[in-house]
Image: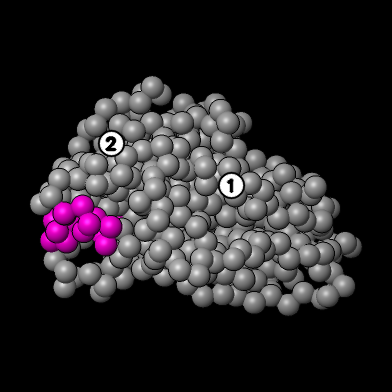
Amino acid sequence: MPYGSTEVHMSINLKDLLGVAEPPERQHAQEPRSAILQSLENPIGGKRLSEVAKPGGSAAVAIDGTMIPDLVRTVVPAVIEHLGTTGIPTENITILVGNGDRERGSTSLLDVLQGEFTEKGIEFVNHSRMTKDLADVGTTASKTRVEVNSRFTSAQVHVAVGEVLPDAYTGFRGAHSTILPGLSSRAAIEMNRSRAFEEDVAPGVIDGNPVLNDALEAARLVGVDMAVNVVATPQGRLVKAYSGEPEASWRQAVSELGDSFKVKVEPNADVMVVSAGGDRFDFDLYHAVWALRGISPIAKKGAPVILLAECSEGLGADGLAKLAHVDMLGELKRRYILGAEALHLIRSTLRTNEVVLVSALPGRLTEPLGLSAAKTANDALGMTTERRRGRSTLVVTHGCSTILSTS
């Protein structure tokens, strides 16, 4: 099962294995470059870049920092090639990696891009939660003051690239996620995420989702000229691209994908094992715990849950430590700081299920949260099964990006 940049192994007796829930197989595009170029030349609900760009002008291309490097290697060259046809020289292009919801911001994707394009004179910017060079582009109807990286707003042409997949906050990620949270200020992210306590905020839920509506409005305020919403296999191979106006192209992607993100599972497992899905999801606990949100509809009361998440960057949000002593939802809302919504998820899960965490985090950080800890996946399985009569085990390999269903 995915764990950080590697994987962990667990030995389960076959008679106890209820099932393995994995993302469905998808046929990848045979000509990915052509698929991306075709989507750029035939935008959904928006103008072609040739209608927006001026010869000799400048362009900023923002990329969601959680995307798999192999997928970025496929998409970005095609976007740059297309920009070249509009008369924008490569030396006038800036590529920004949006890591706004990370404390430090991973440089791995930036390293990949620099290796591919440095010789072409392209500039690179890594945006993290602590970036200070920001531009205020307005306020959403939900009163989120949208501040984003000024290197993006100062360009003449704005392109945002994101992957469409289930998301605990916005229902589905997409190019809008590259703006908020990707390129946004800490304050904007906190205001947006403070709405995550509401019932309509869940993986796969888009109707009435206040976090999603806020993020889509932020993309409009920034003035994204071309959103590139891509669908890929878990290995990062392009399936299809939907380009155009941010909301229109994203909604068509979600509509055409339909139920393809759903995985049917057997209910009533005695033990549940869930991996957050590897280093794009489990770099810190703040992001990894949302794998629990995905399994909550199917978890049997009293069934222990083993969560596999490396968390090499620690907790990931101040609220997980500073508010660990707070139990009441109303108090978490009143004292909200980033991480309070993840803490509420942990508390809600622990009311019905024990959670055993397999991670690199020290006990002094996990114990105040009420999480049990194990050094290895097999140790965790032993802890949970030795005291149980029923041992039927359900394994979920990509908990943060899979929507589980029993029907």
Spot occupied by residue 376 in the image (x, y as percentages of width and height): 62, 73
Q: Is residue 97 magenta?
A: yes
Residue at which label 1 appears: 256
Spot occupied by residue 292 in the image (x, y as percentages of width and height): 63, 50
Q: Are marks 2 and 1 in contact (CB under 8 Å)?
A: no
Residue at which label 2 appears: 223
Closer to the camera: disc 2 or disc 1?
1
Amino acid type indicated by mark 2: Gly
Rendered image: mark on residue 169:
none
Q: Secondary structure at mark 1?
A: helix
Residue 235 seen in the current view: yes
Quadrant of residue 156 within the rendered picture: top left
Placement of 362 over or under 345, stated as above or below:
below
Give the residues in magenta: 80-99
* Residue shown at the point (67%, 48%) measured from the top left: 259
- Considering the image in quadrants, where does the N terminus appear? bottom right
CA gap between label 2 and label 1 equals: 25 Å
The residue closer to the viewer here, 79 or 143, is 79
* Residue shown at the point (45%, 68%) measured from the top left: 31
* Residue shown at the point (30%, 65%) measured from the top left: 77
Spot occupied by residue 295 in the image (x, y as percentages of width and height): 68, 50
The residue closer to the viewer here, 253 or 178, is 253
